[in-house]
Amino acid sequence: MRSLYQNTLNEMVQCDGVGLHSGKKVRMLLKPAKQNTGIVFRREDLPNKPFIKACYDSVIDTRYGTTIGNREVIEIKTVEHLMAAFMGTGVDNVEVILSSCEVPVMDGSSKNFVGMINSTGLKEQISRKKSIKVLKEVSVSLNNKNILIRPSEDFSIKYHIDFSDPVIGKQTHKVVFSNGAFKEQIGSARTFGFLNEVEALHRSGLALGGSLDNVIVVDNGKILNPDGLRYKDEFVRHKILDCCGDMYLAGKNLIGSIEANCAGHELNNILLRELLDNKENYAIIDNEYIDAKETAVA
């Protein structure tokens, strides 16, 4: 289905969970928003219930996740899995209301968020949906890691990872995002970590909410989760999921082809800044032919 107009949710939906890094319990509400609002996060636990718009230039931290914030030191941690779900289901405008500083991790993927969105369905709005069409190749690199985006007639991500642990090793996967590809190939891929890094992460105040219920835990060639993997290459698929979420911080769907080699949240954000800081690199166009929405409008 080709989506020409912006979408929000039919009705408000909510879930309860725990923050992956903060370890704090959090209630999250997804509330319909007016056309041209974009994705807005609100902290209902803070005085005056301040808000921040989901945007690439609001990213303030990329360690083990993507955190957005502003000058008032309002921050929202680990937005990427939810942002990926919004991209994959075609949500343009929504208010995300949180009772704490972090999006709930749920099962470590976007699966639960996609389910929430599909449970209420989408409401088509009057304003046309616009996309960012890449006109020139842009590439960035850091410490032997790199990512680029080049002109294309669709949105795709090809990702390569290379880990020393044999249970992961080298994995490459490519997705062209049309005809439900996000839900079928990417949305259920979970985040992962290594058992030997847990203590160090805890000392840094990270991964305090992590468990076998929401993280694939790897230990010297073994998967510690009793149910194993959802895909044989779930690790690289999750990296693509993260990339989807980070790229949706552009505020619109991208029309371009991404290739990433061992990149991550930091390079994803640097790429967006490089792309969008020069208007010669892209054009804003009416969404007439890209298949950005992958669920039916209810």
Image: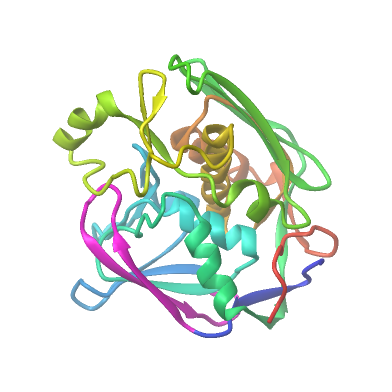
155 left or right of 36? Answer: right
The location of residue 200, given as percent across then percent down, is 19, 28
First to last magenta residue range:
12-38
* The N terminus - image quarter: bottom right
The answer to if 73 sits in the magenta stretch is no
Q: Position of residue 65 (x, y in %)?
A: 38, 43
When asked about the image quadrant of residue 205, the answer is top left
Residue drawn at (53%, 50%), measured in percent from left and top? 245
Q: How is the image coloured?
A: rainbow
User: Can you say whether 232 is above or below 107 in the image?
Assistant: above
Give residue 104's quadrant in the image. Answer: bottom left
Q: Residue at x 72, y 57 (%)?
A: 180
68 and 32: which is toward the camera: 32
Would residue 36 be found to the left or right of residue 128 on screen?
left
Give the residue furthest to the front: 226
- Farthest left residue in view: 203
187, 72: nearer the viewer: 187
Instruction: Quadrant for the C terminus, please.
Output: bottom right
On screen, 152 above or below 263? below
Tell whether 210 sits left or right of 165.
Answer: left
Within the magenta stretch, is there residue 17? yes
- Quarter of the image holding residue 70? bottom left
Q: Position of residue 73 (x, y in %)?
A: 24, 57
Tell me: residue 231, above or below residue 168: below
Residue 55 locus on image (x, y percent): 48, 56
Q: From the viewer's perspective, is residue 21 above or below residue 24?
A: above
